[in-house]
Image (cartoon, rainbow, N blue to C red):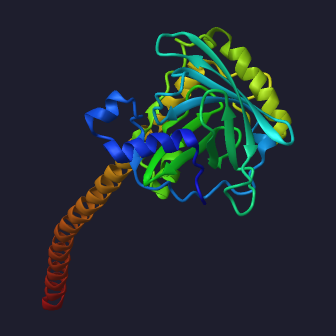
Amino acid sequence: MACRTNTWLAMWMLLAVVLSATSPASALLGIPDFLELGDCAKVVLKENFDPVKYSGLWFDIESVPNQYQHTKKCVTQNYTWTGEYMNVGTRGLTDEDEKVRQGAVMHVEEYDVEKPDPAYMTVDASGVPAAPYQIIATDYRTYSCVYSCLEYFGFRAEFAWVFGRTPTLPPNTIAKCHKKFTGMGVDPKKMFPIVQGEVCPYYEKLDEILATSERQLLTLLGPDVPTTSTTTTSTVTPKLAHEEVLLENIEETVRLEEKIVKEIETKVEANQEVNRVAVEEKEGDVDYSAGLQSSSSCLLLSLLFIAVLILH
């Protein structure tokens, strides 16, 4: 699948080729740090992607740093599928904790592909170059793995995201995206966690926000799909979400310890059985010997008694 290019990126990449991305001149001219040698990865998109189910609130969990992205912390994306394109509302904080709101439109890519696929969209936003948005994996209700890459003159600008329906995700869920990225040849170590939670402006209303998101998911995905809470009337609090992650790690540790204890108990029982058999065999030898001596004595006495009777 071809990756999208644009005039803005071509200009920077041409400068990078001429000056070399590691030269002092490139730093003075402000060439982005994310430019690197190489081609974009070959992407396998999410099969049968449904943009309607993808709609709603998503939290940025991890991403590749982008110095041209204004939102750095507490980043959320709200998607609304219109039937023709996706409206995107982004909120977050800058590094200086200034609130930022941005709007964008994502439409299904039609020009750089053989066949349009809703899992491959292009983001158009004011002040930034158009960029691909490729969904490589999602279950719609928990996580999403997204890849974006621009290439020109042998250089690439490669980005990746892990999104969640809640501000935190269990490590094993994040690992699903990492595995997908690794399989594509994308190094997940380039990604860094996005600050979410108590320091964010949304935190005081998070329970309400998640409850609204949950109701929307029930509408989009149906009542048979598990929700982010144990019942349809309860909500997932930030504290509970964090504790669920810790509980999952603890449960995994307990399972491992139980397995080790089970192995030890099995070995102990085996040793006890060996010792028991050895003791019984030893005791059995003593009993057999005593019994034989007793029988011999009785037989001798009987013979003597018979001899006495005969003599008389």
Q: Residue at x 55, y 9 (%)?
A: 98
Measuring from the top left, give residue 157's x and y in whole percent. 48, 44
Q: Residue at x 18, y 71 (%)?
A: 285
Measuring from the top left, give residue 79's x and y in whole percent. 74, 32
Give the side of residue 216 with respect to residue 112, left or right: right
| Closer-to-camera residue (39/45) | 39
**Is residue 194 something that shows in the picture?**
yes
Give the side of residue 11 with respect to residue 218, left or right: left
Q: Quadrant of the N terminus?
A: bottom right
Q: Which of the 4 quarters of the picture holds residue 107?
A: top right
Measuring from the top left, give residue 105's x and y in whole percent. 74, 34
Q: Residue at x 51, y 45 (%)?
A: 10
The residue lying furthest to the bottom in this view is 310
Q: Is 285 situated above or below 215?
A: below
Q: Which of the 4 quarters of the picture holds residue 82?
A: top right
Give the side of residue 271 with respect to residue 173, left or right: left
**Is residue 256 something that shows in the picture?**
no
